[in-house]
Image (cartoon, rainbow, N blue to C red):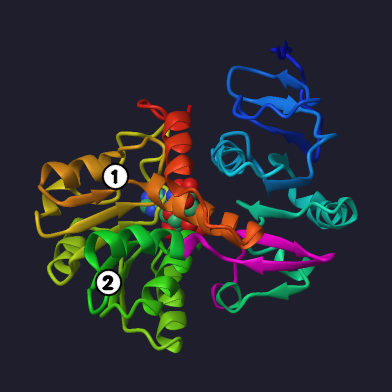
Amino acid sequence: MAEQYPDTPRTQGSSVFLCDSESRGISGSRSLYINHKTVYRTCAFVMEIYGLIGCPVEHSVSPIMQNAAFNGLGIDATYCGFRVSEDNLKDAVKGIKALGIAGFNVTIPHKESIIPFLDILEEKALGIGAVNTVKNVAGRLVGYNTDGRGAVIPLKNAAGLDGRNVLVLGAGGASRALCHALLDEGVGFIHLANRTPERAESLCKELMKAGGSCTTSGLSKRELAESVKDVSVVVNCTSVGLYPEVDETPFPGELFNSDLVVLDVVYNPLETRFLRDAREAGAETIPGVEMLVWQGAMAFEIWTSKKAPVELMREAALKALGEGGWK
Ligand code: NAP
């Protein structure tokens, strides 16, 4: 039976939490509950440690999802969240090597800044200039990016992408990863609409250099109405609509139509206002949790060389996010 420590304070700087979420029961391990969602566990008898580094990481669903996958396949491993401040990133990576941590995910704000501390970059991560997955191969850290492919798989399953024209809202890290993966799928053109036009233009140049066809605009209703006419897929890669700003949307609902396939990378809440508007207009919608699950499944496969139990991971993520979202 786990011990209850509801008010245990977190340490400053790099701290560890979320070793598990009630899903594993390795004999000899001990769980220390911090609150109803997070849990410490001593990892003394666990063969391999995986994790997530970022700041913050407290709201991440990845520990729950990855531990469900390890548990489901009977792999003796655990996945922890590590809050690592920007100042501590270099030391944290050294520590990861020294401790022999087997692999980890990287989230905001370290996806780009971690690159100088890695030994090898997979080609896709090099092209995107950002890393969200790292594997420790005999002490050498190899960086990958599974974010873009994670978004493309559910889009491909729903719509097929070859030759499709895509409207992408946003020009940050998620947009960059998605757009590169869209190019790999042979999409027709990408229209990038972003609040800050310079950022869209810069990403657009990068995509054209990579052989893509791309146009840009701002996020005004007039510009979006014009650009949606020529596309069959719309993806929100901005953070607009993320909890607690759940009534916000980057795209006026009346511009959706029933011929569109629509994905929101925001996964909290499960159905954003953007997706609800699209669904009510008859469009086919894909929630951001699908991207979360697929990018996690690909990371799992990189680490373990085993086929990821995608259904289990989806079930765990959906359960954690719940109907009202992960607050
Ligand atoms: P980022 O690099 O900071 O980019 C944020 C983007 O959102 C930029 O294009 C920014 O526009 C735009 N934006 C922010 N606030 C806005 C506002 N009020 N109005 C209009 N545009 C606004 O962040 P990111 O890494 O791309 O992440 C974006 C979202 O994707 C986050 O919510 C993140 O949680 C989600 N995400 C989900 C997954 C998944 O697995 N489902 C994976 C990765 C990321 P400007 O350029 O004008 O600032």
Residue at the image position 64 percent from the left and 25 percent from the top:
38
Side of 198 where 111 appears, left or right:
right
Residue at disc 2, secondary structure: loop
Residue at disc 1, secondary structure: loop
Are the residues at dot 2 and dot 1 in contact (C-beta closer than 8 Å)?
A: no
Side of 271 where 325 appears, left or right:
right
Residue at the image position 81 percent from the left and 39 percent from the top:
13
Give neighbour class at mark 1: few <14, some 14-19, many 20+ (Cα, 10 Å): some
Side of 106 where 92 appears, left or right:
right
User: Is 135 colored magenta in this rendering?
Assistant: yes
Q: Which residue is mark 1?
A: 249
Residue at the image position 18 percent from the left and 43 percent from the top:
277
Q: Nearer the viewer, residue 161 or 253?
A: 161
Can residue 165 be seen from the camera position used here? yes
Amino acid type indicated by mark 2: Leu
Give neighbour class at mark 2: few <14, some 14-19, many 20+ (Cα, 10 Å): many
Please provide the residue range marked out in magenta. 127-148
Q: Nearer the viewer, residue 2 or 142?
A: 2
Q: Is mark 1 within 8 Å of ligand 1?
A: no
Side of 235 where 39 appears, left or right:
right
Residue at the image position 46 percent from the left and 68 percent from the top:
176
On residue 161, which mark appears? 2
Could you say which quadrant of the image residue 201 lies in?
Answer: bottom left
CA distance separating discs 2 and 1: 25 Å
Disc nearest the viewer among 2 and 1: 2
